[in-house]
Image (spheres, rainbow, N blue to C red):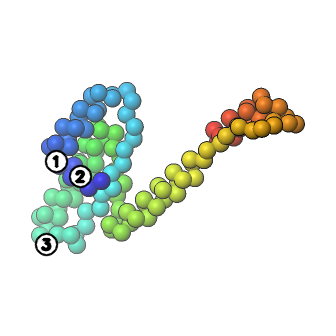
Amino acid sequence: MGFSFSDPNLDRVLSHIRVRFAENQRPHYAIFKRVSKDDFEKEEDFHYAKVRQPIVIEDLKRFNIEVVLVEKYSDITDILQEVYRSLVSSTIFVSTSAYDYAPWGEHAVSSFMRKFGSL
C-alpha cells in the first residue's frame, strides 16, 4: 500500500516478479483516484494528468495489476470493507472429525463435507 507506480525501484521489482513467475501470476489491484479538474490549479496540468492516467492504467496490466478508479479517497474505505467481507465469508473451516459417524458412516460424511467445503 502507498507505493507510487512511477518509482523506478518498484518497476524493477515488478519486472522481476513478472519474469520469474510468468506462468503463475496472481491478480493484483491498485486503487487510483480518478483525475479531477478540482485537483489542479492549472488547466494544462489537469489535461496532462487526464491523458496520462489511462496510459498508466494500461501499462500496469503487463504486471497483472488491475486498477480500480474511485471518485474520492473516502471511497477506498468502502472498497476495503467489501474485500474484507468477501474474504471472511469465503474462509470457513470445515472439519470431518467425529467421534461417531453414525448413522451415515465415515465415507459418506467425509464425502459430504468435502463437497460442502468446496462451495
Q: Amino acid at mark 2?
A: Phe
Which mark sits nearer the N-terminus, 3 or 1? Answer: 1
Query: Residue 93 appears in which quarter of the rendering?
Result: top right
Question: Is 39 left or right of 116, judged from the image as shown?
Answer: left
Question: Is 92 left or right of 40, judged from the image as shown?
Answer: right
Q: Farthest residue in the front direction?
A: 99
Residue toward you, 8 or 47: 8
The residues tagged by marks 3 and 1 sit, at their Cα atoms, a distance apart of 24 Å
The residues tagged by marks 1 and 2 sit, at their Cα atoms, a distance apart of 8 Å
**1 and 2 marks in contact (CB < 8 Å):** yes
Which residue does the numbered mark 1 point to in the structure image? Answer: 7
Question: Is 88 left or right of 68, judged from the image as shown?
Answer: right
Does dot 1 land on a helix, a strand or a loop?
A: loop
Which residue does the numbered mark 3 point to in the structure image? Answer: 41
Position above or below: 73 against 117: below
Which residue does the numbered mark 2 point to in the structure image? Answer: 3
Which mark sits nearer the N-terminus, 2 or 3? Answer: 2
Q: Picture coordinates of residue 3 (x, y %)?
A: 23, 52
Q: Picture coordinates of residue 25 (x, y %)?
A: 37, 34
Q: Picture coordinates of residue 26 (x, y %)?
A: 40, 37
Does dot 2 land on a helix, a strand or a loop?
A: loop
